[in-house]
Image (tube, rainbow, N blue to C red):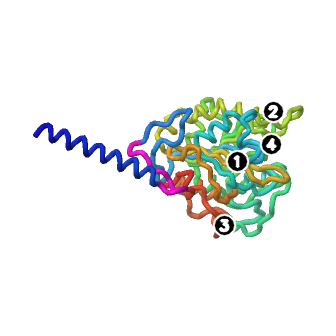
Amino acid sequence: MKVKSLALTSALALASSALAVAGGAGTAAGANPPRAAAAVAPTVSAPCGTGATAPTTYTHVALIMFENKPLKKIVGNTTDAPYLNSLIKACSYSKNDLSLSTTSLTNYIALTSGYKGCRTADSNGVCTSELEITSNKDTTVWPQASKSIFELMGNDAVEWGESMTTNCQLKSSGDFVINHTPFQYYTRTQATLCKANARPFPANAADTLSAKFNLIIPNKPHIMHLVPNTTVSQRIQNGDNWAKTFIPQLLSSAAYQSGNTAIIITWDEGNGSNFYVPLIVITPSTQAGGVSSVAYNHYSVLKGVQQMVGSASPLLGHAGDAGVGSIRDDAVFRIKP
């Protein structure tokens, strides 16, 4: 009886293995592959594809910004951006994400309010007179009347500005550029929430994940911005080197290791002829090596972020328009349970 039991056990194990292999081989093209029953821990070199299931809402979402580089200048450019391309390979990216303007400030405002500019708004912060921003001037030139994600989330949303010298700094100085930091432009919160939650970089990079929503803005050279006497390749290298130092600190943090943190990297704009920008999604549940072709724009990023942090009521500005997709719904990104 003992021999028979062992034989039966072995036969069942072999049958189970065969079924598992058959199930994997039978996955339809384009369908999500089966996830592992138990997730493995993410690492700095393999932060995605762990088999984890995305949480219903995220404890922390970070949106990291870079400047002025179209998709084709970053994706596949392993000479100038080897680290960012390693993240693209280890996680997922979109090849069909559009910026909305060739003016930097316009895109930052769109990413945080759902408008390309708002002159007047009602008492709820809904824009009643849109006015597209057409220059990268300071807050006195382009005050924004609409509600932003910072107002919607209150103290759960923080903007981190590298080389900012004081909270809610309103003028550019040194390597700090005011038109890269949208929080300061919203008149409804400039004198209140901005003074507490538009902050200089902390000493510990991982602390930029401390809020529920964290907008992370590198300084002028680190964000790939035009710096005098540098080539395009050098600017990309500057940003890639910064990312190589900064992002591993986020990936090794307790916040990311918990499985409840998402890191999204994008660029404000491409250039005058190419509006497509890279969009990289990093979570433990995100597919490794995934490429999304779904049509997105900056409003899609805002919509997805609002949903991920559980603050989707109301969806801000044009993020709530019919037909605007959400990055949270993307089958490749896997940031929705």
First-in-chain label (1 vs 4) = 4
Q: Position of residue 71 (x, y in %)?
A: 74, 47
Q: Position of residue 83 (x, y in %)?
A: 67, 34
Q: Nearer the viewer, mark 1 or mark 3?
A: 1
Q: Is residue 211 visible?
A: no
The label number, if any, that marks residue 123 in the structure image: 3
Residue kind at label 4, given as amino acid type: Lys
Q: Position of residue 311 (x, y in %)?
A: 55, 57
First-in-chain label (2 vs 1) = 2
Q: Is residue 37 left or right of residue 141?
A: left
Q: Specify whether residue 36 is painted magenta.
A: yes
The label number, if any, that marks residue 171 in the structure image: 4
The answer to whether 89 is drawn above or below residue 151 in the figure is above
Which residue is outermost to the left?
A: 1
First-in-chain label (4 vs 3) = 3
Spatial CA distance of label 1 from label 3 is: 36 Å
Spatial CA distance of label 3 from label 2 is: 46 Å
Residue position marked by numbered label 1 in the rendering = 278
Q: Is residue 265 visible?
A: yes
Q: Secondary structure at mark 3?
A: loop
Q: Is residue 256 left or right of residue 291?
A: left
Q: Secondary structure at mark 2?
A: helix
How many C-alpha atoms fall within 10 Å of the one at disc 2: few (<14), some, or many (≥20)?
some
Spatial CA distance of label 1 from label 4 is: 29 Å
Q: Nearer the viewer, mark 1 or mark 4?
A: 1
Residue kind at label 3, given as amino acid type: Ser
